[in-house]
Image: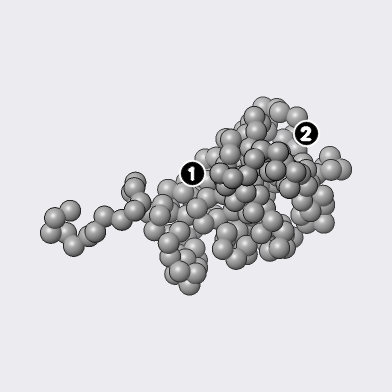
Amino acid sequence: MAGSGVEPGPHTGSGTEATNADLSAPQRASVLSNLDFSEIAKIQLPPASGIADYAIFDRDDARAVHGSQPSFTKSFEPERIRELIDVFVQATAPSVSASELKESTREIELAGKTFTISGPRGAQYPLEIATLHAKDGGEVYFVAPTATLLLLFQTAPGADVQYQSNEKQGVWTAVRSFAFALSEKGL
């Protein structure tokens, strides 16, 4: 680094994963508006992945950044997205016990329906993914955060079941792949 004029920062890795999280809101909005989310989704979320729709939200203001369909994306109020973001913030807080997390995050209302939350702690999925099952048994959502975004995926018919299945496993794999691809872009 001598002579390069670059001071090593507190972050490790390629640098992009920390850079976008450290940007101001207007700078981040500019980066997000220039990113082709559709192209990333086309590669990471093939039709056979078991995902019907997806929406991407900024973790700072809980507003939609991109989605597969405007009607799906607009069906989520920022206040409810903020509640989902808080679920992940609590899950990663070292002072929150598993019982406290379970007590405060059992249900959430999204798009006019009540969902039961599974994860992000526990044996079902790793910390970075939560599953939401509609109480009426109709819909299943997968939710995953990145450093700056919250990703929400609606499962396609066949993967929208209350139990572990091969179809749900395919969705889980696609969700992780998509989240990783966005994280590699520094998001």
The secondary element bearing badge 2 is classed as loop
Location of residue 169 in the rendering, given as x and y in whole percent from the top left corner: 63, 31
**Distance (Cα) linking label 2 and label 1:** 25 Å
Of the pair 5 and 180, the residue shown nearer to us: 5
Looking at numbered disc 2 in the image, what kind of residue is underneath it?
Answer: Gln
Of the pair 50 and 100, the residue shown nearer to us: 100
Residue farthest toward the bottom in the current orientation of the protein: 26
Location of residue 51 in the rendering, given as x and y in whole percent from the top left corner: 66, 42
Callout 2 crowding tier (Cα within 10 Å): few <14, some 14–19, many ≥20: some
In the drawing, does residue 61 fall left or right of residue 20? right
The residue wearing badge 1 is 180
The vertical placement of 165 against 57, above or below, is above
Residue farthest toward the front in the current orientation of the protein: 95
Of the pair 11 and 167, the residue shown nearer to us: 11
Callout 1 crowding tier (Cα within 10 Å): few <14, some 14–19, many ≥20: some
Asked whether the viewer can see residue 133, the reply is: yes
The vertical placement of 119 against 80, above or below, is above
In the drawing, does residue 185 fall left or right of residue 152? left
Location of residue 89 in the rendering, given as x and y in whole percent from the top left corner: 59, 51
Numbered label attached to residue 162: 2
What residue is at 53 percent from the left and 46 percent from the top? 179
The secondary element bearing badge 1 is classed as helix
